[in-house]
Amino acid sequence: MPGSRTGRPPVQRSSKRPAAARPPRDNPLRTLYVRARKAWDRPLTAYYLILGGSLLITVLGLVMVYSASQITALQLSLPGSYFFRKQFLAACIGGVLLFVASRMPVRLHRALAYPMLAGSVFLMILVQVPGIGVAVNGNQNWISVGGPFQLQPSEFGKLALVLWGADLLARKQDKRLLTQWKHMLVPLVPVAFMLLGLIMLGGDMGTAIILTAILFGLLWLSGAPTRLFGGVLSIAVTLGFILIKTSPNRMGRLACIGATDPGPNDQCWQAVHGIYALASGGLFGSGLGASVEKWGQLPEAHTDFIFAVTGEELGLAGTLSVLALFAALGYAGIRVAGRTEDPFVRYAAGGVTTWITAQAVINVGAVLGLLPIAGVPLPLFSYGGSALLPTMFAIGLLIAFARDDPAARVALAMRQPRFGRKRAAVRGSAGAAGPRRWNTMRRRASAARSSGER
């Protein structure tokens, strides 16, 4: 064998081993999606979304009410924080109602259905009594409760219809009566139309639309056939068309959809200046408190058009954040209604979700110029204690239903004993150290004997 130049025998080089195949790297976007999906499917996701989303909307609403109402308060020779203080008081009372509703058992919610319906009907009748009812902006839907405080009974009528309708449909489902159309419609539809008639006596068509949406939501959840659903819808649309056609004010609001000019006699002034406010906000807004439209140009800046002021001061980022919170709240409500086995919980959760979602869509759609101005506030966000109190009670309902889910109950039960275990460990270290140590040593001894030691 020929040697190398150095005189040493050539070194036998081993053949190269093929490199081990590296495991494919996970796509970071897919990993993030999988983790988000797992977090989304946890038992307490709906509970946290409802609680956190509603509180964030309420707190942000308080900030925007303070910002949007200062100029209006000063124009009325009132302190700048006048409307904010009233809204803050209503939010505190609503927080108590939310907590109480979230801790009440389902059977107690069902027991409240009939008293709440009777009380709402009684108050809506009182609205039409001269000397008791108060007219605001042409609609007589208010009752003075003393001083600067007024009550709008129709707002409590929404909550009453949800609770009473859910209890009625649940009892009929237990008796297997919902397969007959007459049991599905009677007495739910007549009672709902009675509430609608009382509301329309005061001229508040916006609240009547929300009540109609709740009725349709309950019928949809009860499995109403398409023909029956379409029949009720056609009756409601016909009545709505007649009410709009016979009112010049409502026809003027309908003509302002998509308007870019105030028009003759400035009939589209509010709609156009709402668009101006949103357009001047840009991406991140002009800054909190720096709105120009609230200086007398935009009517109802702190109530029906607070979303426009939010867009002007917080920009597109602020408005999208508010919409995302409402979307999360709506998804959580649908999830609660879809995962329960209790028919009352399903109907009540679906009714509350329909109520809040429909009202938010109508308010935002009016501000964007996509829908006629209906005069309904943005839930949990706009100024108005009469609207805030029943809405927060309804949010408490959703929280109670989310906690009542079997998987959520197990998850909450696993979370709660943590502090108890810590306290038990402290007590055990003081007085029960001997037995605890003896049990540990006994387990170690048994493990050693099982390995072969005698």
Image: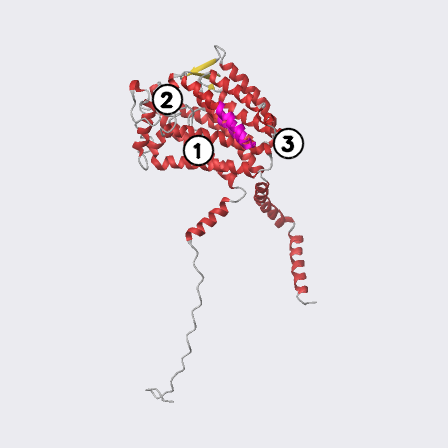
Q: Find residue 282 and report its image quarter.
A: top left
Please state which amino acid type lies under the numbered disc 1: Ile
Q: Is residue 342 above or below residue 250?
A: below
Decide if residue 105 is on the left or right side of residue 73: right
- Between disc 1 and disc 2, whose residue precedes? 1
Q: Amino acid at mark 3?
A: Asp
User: Quarter of the image containing the N terminus?
Assistant: bottom left
Dot 1 crowding, Cα within 10 Å, few <14, some 14–19, many 20+: many
Whether residue 38 is visible to the viewer of this picture, yes or no, is yes
Q: Amino acid type of disc 2?
A: Arg
Q: Which mark is residue 253?
A: 2
Mark closer to the observer (1, 3): 3
Instruction: Single out the residue that lies furthest toward the front.
Output: 227
User: Quadrant location of residue 175?
Assistant: top right
Callout 3 crowding tier (Cα within 10 Å): few <14, some 14–19, many ≥20: few
Report the side of 54 relative to 177 (left or right). Answer: left
Q: Which residues are magenta?
A: 211-235
Q: Quarter of the image for the C terminus: give it.
A: bottom right
Give SS at disc 3.
helix
Query: Residue placed farthest to the right in the image?
Result: 454
Q: Residue 88's spot in the image, x, y percent? A: 44, 27
Q: Which residue is mark 3?
A: 174
Q: Which mark is residue 57?
A: 1
Query: In terms of depth relative to the viewer, which is nearer, 411 or 449?
Result: 411
Q: Nearer the viewer, residue 64 or 370?
A: 370
Q: CA distance from mark 1 to mark 2?
A: 28 Å
Does label 1 or label 3 sit earlier along the sequence? Answer: 1
The Cα–Cα distance between marks 1 and 3, rounded to whole angstroms, is: 37 Å
- Residue 224 included in the magenta stretch of the image: yes
